[in-house]
Image (cartoon, grey):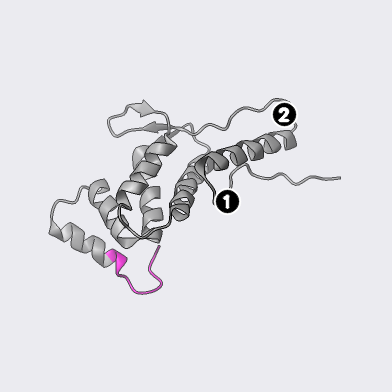
Amino acid sequence: MESTLHSPVLVGVRTTPRATTIVYWLVTALFCLQLGFTAWAQLRLPQVVKQDGSRTEFDREKLRTGFMRALHKRPVPTPLVDDAVNAVVQQTLALGEREIRSRRIGEMVMKELYKLDDVAYIRFASVYKSFQDVDDFQDAIKEVRKPPGKNK
């Protein structure tokens, strides 16, 4: 009987971070068994290369904190924030790279915030893109006010 090889990347998981981690490891274990491994290694997130060239471990909690800062006092349910964090983690894993630039992670976060909340997107973009004056904010506002069919 032929078995289908499934990816260890979770799609659309809505649960607590702890439960997500448990499910993630179970799926990873099953994936490795399907490949014929008797012992499986942890799928590792890549090292983050900061703008100054230093490297650090990918920190899911730091990622979540960035989302929460941008979404502070915004009407976005926690499960949607968790989904956005998971989406960035999944995209990062899917790259299959050992390193990822912090700018690339920032771009992924901006795309997810753009889908979630316009105000949070502009908050994050103002820091991420180092807005210098009111014109930068106006440009960002024009971006989120595009008519239906805008590039989200």
Question: How busy is the neighbourhood of tag 1: few (under 14 within 10 Å), some, or many (20 plus)?
Answer: few
Q: Residue at x 22, y 62 (%)?
A: 139
Which disc is residue 11 wearing? 1
The picture places residue 42, in percent across and down from the top left corner, at 59, 29
Q: Does dot 1 land on a helix, a strand or a loop? A: loop
Q: Which residues are magenta?
A: 143-152
Which residue does the numbered mark 2 point to in the structure image?
A: 37
Q: Nearer the viewer, residue 8 or 73?
A: 73
Q: Is residue 81 above or below residue 20?
A: below
Q: Is residue 120 left or right of residue 134?
A: right
Q: Is residue 25 above or below residue 112?
A: above
Q: Is residue 115 left or right of residue 86?
A: left
Which of the 4 image quarters holds residue 103? top left
Mark 1–mark 2 Cα distance, whole angstroms, equals 23 Å
Q: Residue at x 31, y 29 (%)?
A: 53
Q: Does dot 2 land on a helix, a strand or a loop? A: loop
Q: Is residue 22 left or right of residue 68?
A: right
Q: Nearer the viewer, residue 84 or 2?
A: 84
Quadrant the C terminus occupies: bottom left
The picture places residue 71, in percent across and down from the top left corner, at 33, 53
Q: Is residue 149 magenta?
A: yes
Q: Residue at x 47, y 33 (%)?
A: 46
For the residue marked with disc 2, what is the amino acid? Phe
Q: Is residue 55 left or right of residue 3?
A: left
For the residue marked with disc 1, what is the amino acid? Val
The picture places residue 1, in percent across and down from the top left corner, at 86, 45
